Amino acid sequence: MQFFNGEGISQEVLEMELKRPDVYVWVGMLDHNKLIAIHRGLVWGGYLLLKGVAVSKKWQGSIAALQLASFMLSHAKLFGLKGVAAWVEPSKPERFLSERLKIKPHGQFLHRYSIPFHNLNCSPSYTEKIILSGRESFTFDKSPLVDDIFMSSGTDISWIFDNGRLVLSANPCGHVSQLSNVINKFSPLAKDIGAKALEVFIPAVDLMSSVEILRYQVQRLSRTPVRLGIRTFEN
């Protein structure tokens, strides 16, 4: 399955996520019993992150994507989440969807990087008992590269298992050289959940860090800088 954001989802990942609606939210749209559109979301940091939408070719240009996203927003409200969030890439058409949903970008522009975990032999069983998202305490540098993207205070980092990656809501390091501490800290958790890589953020304007992070054999997940957009529900 391929989403508009270019990220593919394997059958194995799909089956696992469908069994865990507490963490992964999937909604679809049918036309005469035929699936024409689908939307994927992640419950992370108290928000529902709208992570990917796919619409069949015949229905592209319709309001299908907006209808599904609106349903996701209602779902987040119903389940008592703080709000909805989405990665906003200025060059992508999805930004118009975010605008229609009143999801407003905040914070700095970021690049998303995937750092592979090495020598982690793991084959977890994805039962209802396995924890696939949570918070982990970590000592932040006085000037972290990226503060918590959900604007959470304190020393906790929200994490989630997303398509084989362990994604962190902050980059607590003051310098890229300190990333090895983050990797070591989260390696046991990665082994438990079967994560193959760690996803971290680097400020888009920090060219030196973008070069230095290459030593970790990274893959850049965003072709252009992105910002997290957030819509917080009123009490």
Image: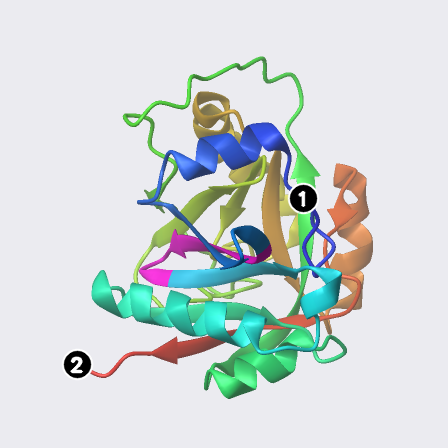
Say what secondary structure mark 2 lies in.
loop
Front residue of this view, candidates 86 and 9: 9
Question: If the image is split into quadrants, where does the C terminus sit?
Answer: bottom left
Who's the residue at 70% across and 77% down the image? 61
- Whether residue 84 sits left or right of residue 30 in the image: it is left
Let me know if residue 194 appears in the view.
Answer: yes
Who's the residue at 49% across and 63% down the image? 50
Extent of the magenta region: 36-47
| Residues at discs 2 and 1 in contact (Cβ within 8 Å) | no
Query: In the rendered image, which residue does mark 1 sit on?
Result: 1
Who's the residue at 64% across and 34% down the image? 10
Three-letter amino acid code at the position of disc 2 = Asn
- Whether residue 218 sits left or right of residue 183 in the image: it is right
Who's the residue at 45% across and 27% down the image? 193
Closest to the camera, between mark 2 and mark 1, is 1
**Position in image of residue 202 (x %, y %):** 66, 61
Earlier along the polypeptide chain: callout 2 or callout 1? 1
Three-letter amino acid code at the position of disc 1 = Met
Query: In the rendered image, which residue does mark 2 sit on?
Result: 235
Front residue of this view, candidates 196 and 12: 12
In the image, is residue 46 part of the stretch drawn in magenta?
yes
Q: Quadrant of residue 175?
A: bottom right
User: Which numbered disc covers residue 10?
Assistant: none
Front residue of this view, candidates 54 and 122: 54
**Position in image of residue 119 (x %, y %):** 65, 16
| Cα distance in 3D space between marks 2 and 1 | 37 Å
Residue at the extreme left of the image, as rendered: 235
Instruction: Classify 10 Å Cα crowding around label 2: few (below 14), some (14-19), many (20 and above).
Output: few
**Position in image of residue 116 (x %, y %):** 68, 33
Question: If the image is split into quadrants, where does the N terminus sit?
Answer: top right
